[in-house]
């Protein structure tokens, strides 16, 4: 197995984080997870789908309470693996690297508890607008009512996790996603949830081109 590219990318990633102040324990933990990922991506084309599938497969071997940290690490490392210099520079300049990814975590609740809350839960204007926009966009893209209902419930689960977030930004959104995906025990449901929240993010931030990120057919196929 030729993993020179992967190890060079890992070393560059860890070196940058060290320069930004991550301690030895933090570097060691990141190296541990990346070494576990390397065999699945070594020699593979620098393709996002291939990388995502490797990460999702490895998730089955990661303790659920460690998912938020693990997902933050592999998300950052991806840009080094595919040599996306512009993305790395943007992350660095904008101080986007999550040096302490677990600083805030949503309140822990099991799926049954959260699911039962959805029918009676009231959402504020800040959440209602993107929910309605996402629902409308799904119908425009040809989704039937059952598909819309499923996606809306998955999104509402995420919004419940986000309710006590200290801020409303992409970092908090990612942390809520990382914390929520672990409550699903079936891998197909995990993959569908991740596909849905990737779509919904653009509605959540009010992106005028949000509808262009909907990929219903591909999401259903991977589920």
Image (cartoon, helix red, strand yellow):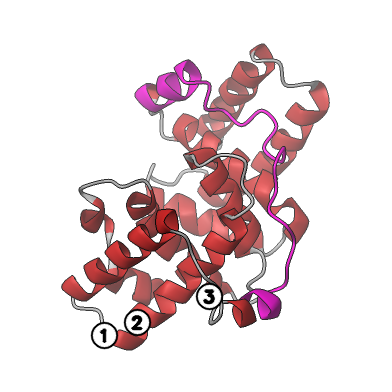
- Where does the image place residue 148, in percent across and percent down from the top left? 34, 78
* Mark drawn on residue 189: 3
Label 3 with label 2: CB-CB less than 8 Å: no
Secondary element under disc 3, as helix, strand or loop, is: helix
Report crowding for label 1: few under 14, some 14 to 19, many 20 or more residues within 10 A (C-alpha).
Answer: few
- Residue at 41% x, 28% y is 83
128 lies left or right of 161:
left
- The span picked out in magenta is 86-114
The residue carrying mark 1 is 144
Q: Looking at the figure, which quarter contains the N terminus? A: top right
User: Where 133 falls versus 16 (above or below)?
Assistant: below
Report, in whole angstroms, how far the alpha carbon at label 3 lies from the one at label 2.
Answer: 13 Å
User: Could you say which is closer to the camera, residue 141 or residue 7?
Assistant: 141
- The reply to whether residue 223 is visible in this rendering is no
The residue carrying mark 2 is 147
* Mark drawn on residue 103: none
Residue 98 shown in magenta: yes
Label 1 with label 2: CB-CB less than 8 Å: yes
Report crowding for label 3: few under 14, some 14 to 19, many 20 or more residues within 10 A (C-alpha).
Answer: some
Foreground mark, 3 or 2, reads: 2
- Residue at 24% x, 70% y is 136
Please report whichever mark, 3 or 2, sits nearer to the chain's N-terminal start: 2
Report crowding for label 2: few under 14, some 14 to 19, many 20 or more residues within 10 A (C-alpha).
Answer: some
User: Could you say which is closer to the camera, residue 204 or residue 54?
Assistant: 204
Secondary element under disc 1, as helix, strand or loop, is: loop
User: Where 158 falls versus 154 (above or below)?
Assistant: above
- Residue at 36% x, 70% y is 219
């Amino acid at each position: 197995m030729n993993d020179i590219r992967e190890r060079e990318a890992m070393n560059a990633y860890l070196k940058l984080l060290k320069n930004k102040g991550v301690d030895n324990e933090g570097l060691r933990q990141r190296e541990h997870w990346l070494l576990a990922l390397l065999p699945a991506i070594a020699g593979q084309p620098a393709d996002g789908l291939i990388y995502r599938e490797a990460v999702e497969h490895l998730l089955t071997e990661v303790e659920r309470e460690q998912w938020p940290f693990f997902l933050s690490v592999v998300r950052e490392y991806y840009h080094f693996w595919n040599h996306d210099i512009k993305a790395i520079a943007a992350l660095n300049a904008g101080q986007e690297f999550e040096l302490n990814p677990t600083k805030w975590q949503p309140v822990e609740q099991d799926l049954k508890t959260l699911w039962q809350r959805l029918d009676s839960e009231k959402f504020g204007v800040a959440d209602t607008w993107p929910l309605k926009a996402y629902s409308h966009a799904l119908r425009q893209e040809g989704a039937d009512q059952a598909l819309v209902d499923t996606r809306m419930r998955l999104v509402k689960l995420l919004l419940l996790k986000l309710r006590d977030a200290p801020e409303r930004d992409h970092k908090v959104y990612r942390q809520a996603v990382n914390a929520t995906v672990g409550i699903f025990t079936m891998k197909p449901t995990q993959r569908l949830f991740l596909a849905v929240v990737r779509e919904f993010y653009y509605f959540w931030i009010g992106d005028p081109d949000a509808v262009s990120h909907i990929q219903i057919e591909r999401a259903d196929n991977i589920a």
